[in-house]
């Protein structure tokens, strides 16, 4: 198999894999210090605990279906 065909096949596999990807969920995070709640995809840092519900939007208003 030629190098061109190998690269083409690899590209096609990559496109198929990426087409199945979905955006990361948003979560509410509660401060252990003062109970302030914020919405973020990743932890704001130490001292924050993740609440259980996942959300579809950056305001944590639309719950993600199970």
Image (cartoon, rainbow, N blue to C red):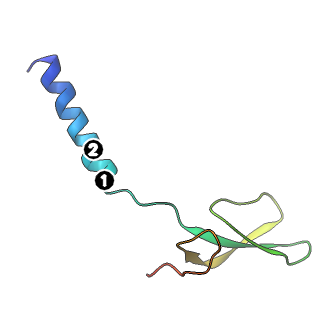
Closest to the observer: 45 or 60?
60
Residue occupying the far right of the picture: 34
Return the x and y of residue 21 as percentages of the image width and height: 37, 56
Return the x and y of residue 9 as percentages of the image width and height: 17, 33
Image quadrant assignment for residue 25? bottom right
Left of 5 or right of it: where is 55?
right
Label placed on residue 5: none
Closest to the observer: 21 or 52?
21
Image quadrant assignment for residue 7? top left
Left of 58 or right of it: where is 14?
left
Q: Residues within 10 Å of mark 1 (few under 14, many from 20)?
A: few
Residue occupying the far top of the picture: 2
Judging from the image, what secondary structure is the residue with disc 2 in? helix
Which residue is at 52% across, 72% downward?
A: 56
Q: Which residue is mark 2?
A: 15
Return the x and y of residue 57 as percentages of the image width and height: 57, 71
Q: Residues within 10 Å of mark 2 (few under 14, many from 20)?
A: few
Q: Which corner quadrant holds the N terminus?
A: top left
Judging from the image, what secondary structure is the residue with disc 1 in? helix
Q: Which corner quadrant holds the C terminus?
A: bottom left
Residue occupying the far left of the picture: 1
Q: Is residue 59 above or below residue 20?
A: below
Which residue is at 71% across, 60% downward?
A: 43
Marks 2 and 1, how far apart in space? Answer: 6 Å
Q: Is residue 38 above or below residue 14?
A: below
Return the x and y of residue 6 as percentages of the image width and height: 17, 26
Whether tag 2 and tag 1 are in contact, CB under 8 A, the answer is yes
Total number of numbered discs in the rendering: 2
Q: Is residue 43 above or below residue 10?
A: below
Label placed on residue 19: 1
Which residue is at 29% across, 49% downward?
A: 17
């Amino acid at each position: 198999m030629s190098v061109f065909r190998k690269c083409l096949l690899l590209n096609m596999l990559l496109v198929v894999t990426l087409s199945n990807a979905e955006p990361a969920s948003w979560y509410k995070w509660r401060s252990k210090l003062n109970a302030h709640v914020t919405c973020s995809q990743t932890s704001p840092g130490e001292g924050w605990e993740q609440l259980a519900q996942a959300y579809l939007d950056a305001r944590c208003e639309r719950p993600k279906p199970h």
